[in-house]
Amino acid sequence: MEKIILDILNVLRDGKDLDEQLLAKIIHAHNSGIKDNKRHHAKKKLLPYYLKVKQSDQKRWISWDINDDLEVQLIKTLQVKPRRTASGVATITVITKPWKCSSNCLYCPNDLRMPKSYLSDEPACQRAERNYFDPYLQVASRLRALTHMGHATDKIELIILGGTWSDYSKAYQIWFVKELFRALNDGGDLRCGEDVELSAKLRRKFYKDAGLSNDETELHENVASEQQKIDKGETTYNQAMQRLYKDNAIWQKIAHEQTASLDELYKQHKINESTTHRVVGLVVETRPDVIDCDNLTLLRQLGCTKVQIGVQSLSPEILYMNNRGISVTKIQEAFELLRLFGFKIHAHFMVNLYGSSVEADKQDFKRFVTEKPFQPDEVKLYPCSLVNGTGLCAHYSAGSWRPYSEDELIDILVADVIATPPFIRISRMIRDISAKDIMVGNKKTNLRQMVEAEVRKLCTEVSEIRFREIASSETDIGELRLDDFTYETTATVEHFLQWVTPANKIAGFLRLSLPKQNVPIRQQAKLPFAKDEAMIREVHIYGKVAKISAAGENAQHLGLGKQLIESACVIAVKAGCNKMNVISSVGTREYYRNLGFEDNKLYQRRTLNQG
């Protein structure tokens, strides 16, 4: 493997263009003389090998004669899946422990090894299970993987999945988030993260000593009997969860240790403000009917900045038929509170639900992205699939539900993309459910590419954010213009300020909320700010992830974010606001302090100059 690295370095020193094709030829040339397939070298092994040599064999590494510029080129060449951090942030997804769910949706999987709606074959779920669902271990292992893939990990978005976050106890929520931050704070430079390795070993030993297994075969056997009962309709998911987890002595022992105070969490927050791996976004997943001021206040105390919320449909009939148990009125109230509290709203929406149709789905989504009570910031838009053990199976067998054909599905999703306004990002079109778990329904992992290919045939002007992201392409700051797209919700006037290229590609944006006066909001007295205070809900600059303290590639670190913030303050003053709040992440607090914002309980706040 050393010879491959040396050949790559020689090409880079000569100033030649080392693209994927040439890299493949270099690797193939070295593999051609190896008879044992197990010893063949792959691209994904090269960067971990390089980092290991640099860490543990300094004499050899020095002999390679690599300066800082050459190392940057080498890591860029060996990077795996560069799209992962092209948006400007490295994402780490973690899963909470299996737990009861206060809902029982018709289409929702009932895998007893996972929290509700998730399946043990999904990649993030597999990582969670191998790590005993421990937040510290999940973050540590994912950090290591991202580093070995060549991604910068100084700016992290943490995504916590696992059904309904508020169904877990407050003590568990605080502990879980505290451990996420502790793992990042302990990590330092993961190329020499001895503290993480030691802490991870002690944590794994705790789970093993408690009697908890992470062996795939044992885990399957532990739930097999109860899983069969669920699949036959002889018991419910919650009843089985009670027996397998809440009443289980091993899990009870573990739960006793899974508790923390807010003061303990705040200590980790403070460290994270200036550590190597800073949290620039914290996301949790919940349902509209559990959203109130008390829960949202706790989320802000945890450091949360974005909420994933399961909506699925705006049709009362469809919600009822699918056992959703949530009213459209409650969805509207949840959106109002989330937006006033400053959260980014990332909604889940489904097509092909039981009782719906192609045309009904198109109209439903159009309502969702254009009508005042809703208009999310992001959407997970994915088709309903049939998974064994769900209530939908009976309707499939009876012929009262069928999966859409591929043509029907693409037709709907194409219409939805075209209907999406410029302030909304469709983040996903499929879930990470493996093909073997899907009985019927879409199994193609490239569904989004198929949809976007059709969109390009039909429409030259697409507003949806992800379609317009500059990602890793070059950005000429002199060509950018600032566009203010304004729209109204039931509780606010929203300004979506965006930096766009002449071709309407988006290089960065800011979400500004101006609260409307005299809007009847439930729990008005518990809102954490006055009516004349504006709110910056998100600032995002695209481009490859760059070091926080260094000049980055593309749009990042060119002052675009600061200009967006100053423009937002001007708009707020004209609207009569005297304070500007920002729902800052823990890792961005110092950035906002440098722009005149002061720490103010749940937010950072700046007094606006009315002159």
Image (cartoon, rainbow, N blue to C red):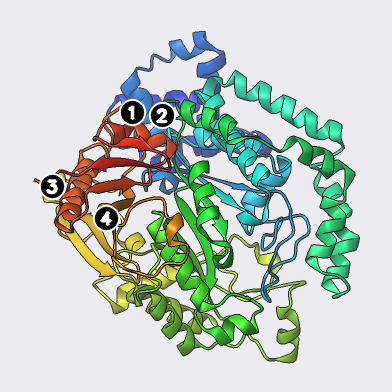
Badge 3 amino acid = Gln
Mark 3 residue crowding within 10 angstroms, few (<14) / some (14–19) / many (20+): few
Residue 443: x and y, percent? 60, 69
Q: Residues within 10 Å of mark 4 (few under 14, many from 20)?
A: some
Residue wearing tag 3: 610
What is the CA distance from the residue labelled 1 to the residue labelled 2? 6 Å
What's the distance in space between the residues labelled 3 and 4, CA to CA?
13 Å
Residue 144 x, y percent position in the rendering: 56, 32
User: Which numbered disc flags the more N-terminal residue, 3 or 1?
Assistant: 1
- Residue name at image x 67 percent, y 43 percent: 172
**Quadrant location of residue 356?**
bottom right
Q: Is residue 32 visible?
A: no
- Position of residue 65 in the picture relative to residue 350 (left or right): left
Q: Amino acid at mark 4?
A: Asp
Front in this rendered view, residue 279 or 386: 279
Residue 8's disc is 2
- Disc number lying in front (1 or 4): 4
